[in-house]
Amino acid sequence: MENLNLSLIVPVYNRPNEIEELLDSLSKQTDKNFEIVIVEDGSTITCTEQIEKYKSVFDIKYFFKPNTGPGQSRNYGMERASGNYFIILDSDCIIPSGYIATVRKSLSENYVDTFGGPDRADKSFTNLQQAVDYSMTSFFTTGGIRGGKKQLDKYYPRSFNMGISKEVFEKTGGFPSVRYAASKAAGEDIELSINIYKQGFKIGLISDAYVYHKRRTSIKQFYRQVYNFGYARVTLSRRNKGTLKLVHLLPLAFTLGSVGLIICAIFISWMFLLPLMLFMLLVNLDAIIRKRSLLIGKLAMFISLIQLYGYGLGFMKGVWDSLIGKKIGS
């Protein structure tokens, strides 16, 4: 695409410190030819101070709107952006200095209408954040469907690091307005990707366009997030027939299977725990190799269980709500 004008869209809710870190990382880009659109989604703790600090560094557009969730806030930002290609980032991301240059080079050489990029954990992240990063990107827990090169399903970009052209936004309408889980909007990025595929646009992975993603900073927040992911997957399958794949059932199978093994171990023989123990050993060894830390390896076993059980329980709740005819969120 000639004359690629980039607009970075960032929704935020009560996270001025994250915006500070994000803007600081963007100030170090080797390619500074972009605008930033920050949308306060009904925040009570705003980023006004941080925006003022960086106004002389960037072309920043700053908006405040009532709370409607991240998807609609992204749409709000894209409607008001001046670029012809939008890059959507989460507020808890830190952007490597060569990110914009990598995206621009990739799109100029092999243009796609929509792209996604992977995420990594920066060395400065806590051990818990490192363990969460491992769990959310490991083949053992996700089947490799969150931005990795090995995948068991069609690639769907995720909204923490996602680019879409203005043409795609105008023809698809952007992120859907449906809320997928009771307390959080989840699954909006996947449904948008499904819609983009249906419209015949080209989607690609730019593997070198990674971001450092802090993810959830507490176990409770992480559990709630993956629970919502599981619930949202069922809602997505109800709205988009044929999108539920075998890989999406793996956490449910793990949840039910491991509970069955534990019951058998209690009433029959402890040897029924061997498959579960082997799985945890593989996770532990893989995490130690990837993160080069014994402590993170131990944490990764615990966090991986939380992810699989949380997603599995959310999935089961979604199935139950579907069976009793509960209406999809509005």
Image: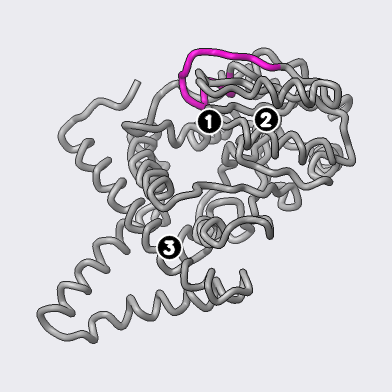
Q: Residue at x 52, y 21 (%)?
A: 43
- Tell me the SS state at disc 2: strand
Say the numbered circle drawn on residue 304: 3
How crowded pointer 3 is (Cα within 10 Å; few <14, some 14-19, many 20+) is rated as many
Of tags 1 and 3, the one toward the viewer is 3
Q: Which residues fall within the magenta stretch?
A: 62-75
Q: Is residue 154 above or below residue 281?
A: above
CB atoms of marks 2 and 1 within 8 Å = yes
Per the model, the C-alpha gap separating discs 2 and 1 is 10 Å
Residue under the point 19% across and 69% down = 260
Mark nearer the N terminus (3 vs 2):
2
Q: Is residue 150 left or right of residue 252?
A: right
**Residue at the limit of the structure toward the front, as seen here:** 49
Residue 233 on image: x %, y %: 38, 42
Mark 2 nearby-residue class (10 Å; few <14, some 14–19, many ≥20): many
What SS does tag 3 mark?
helix
Name the amino acid type tagged 1. Leu
Residue 257 appears at what percent x and percent y? 26, 67
Which numbered disc, 1 or 3, marks the residue that appears first in the sequence? Answer: 1
Image disc number at residue 164 = 2
Q: Is residue 144 magenta?
A: no
Where on the picture, by quarter, is residue 104? top right
Q: Residue furthest left?
A: 267
Does any portion of residue 172 appear in the rendered image? no
Magenta residue check for 66: yes
Q: Mark 3 or 2, which is nearer the eye?
A: 3
- Hey, what amino acid is under mark 3? Ser
Q: Would you name the residue on which mark 1 appears?
A: 192
Q: Quadrant of the C terminus?
A: top left
Residue sitting at x 18%, y 30%: 325
